[in-house]
Amino acid sequence: TRGPDGEFLKDTGPAIRSLTFDELQAYDVGRIQPGTAYAARFSTQKGADGVRIPKLTEVFELVKRNGADHIRFNIETKLTPTSGADTPDPDTFAAALVK
């Protein structure tokens, strides 16, 4: 991930949930940082500049627009009993997802 300054993140960035969607859009997630062990694991992956994390509704719309009704979604929440302040509580998360 490259930060708002265009440079690859050197440290762990802010928690995604702490950012507004507009702030999140400043991060480019289109390529793995070259020369890292992670990049070596995925050496055949082709990067693309300017890739942003879409809204879930945008993903659903893309599938619908392409007539890909056979696509099924498995939405992994990443919520655990020990997540603490790193994630929203399950009720808040469920309400946001339904919205």
Image (cartoon, rainbow, N blue to C red):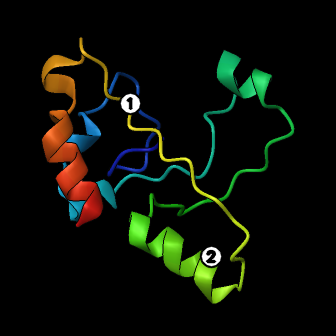
On screen, residue 92 versus residue 81, left or right, reads left
Q: Is residue 42 left or right of residue 29?
A: right
At 12% from the left edge and 23% from the top edge, which residue is drawn?
Answer: 85
Label disc, if present, on residue 53 of the rendered structure: none
Q: Nearer the viewer, residue 4 or 12?
A: 12
Quadrant location of the C terminus in the rendered image = bottom left
| Looking at the image, residue 45 lies above or below residue 43 | below
Q: Can you tell which quarter of the image residue 24 is in?
A: bottom left
Residue tagged 2: 63
Residue 93 drawn above or below residue 53: above
* First-in-chain label (1 vs 2): 2
- Residue bearing mark 1: 78
Q: Residue at x 64, y 59 (%)?
A: 72
Residue at 41% across, 64% down? 56
Amino acid under disc 1: Lys
User: Could you tell me residue 17's position as x and y percent?
Assistant: 22, 42
- Residue 2 lies, in percent from the top left, at 45, 44
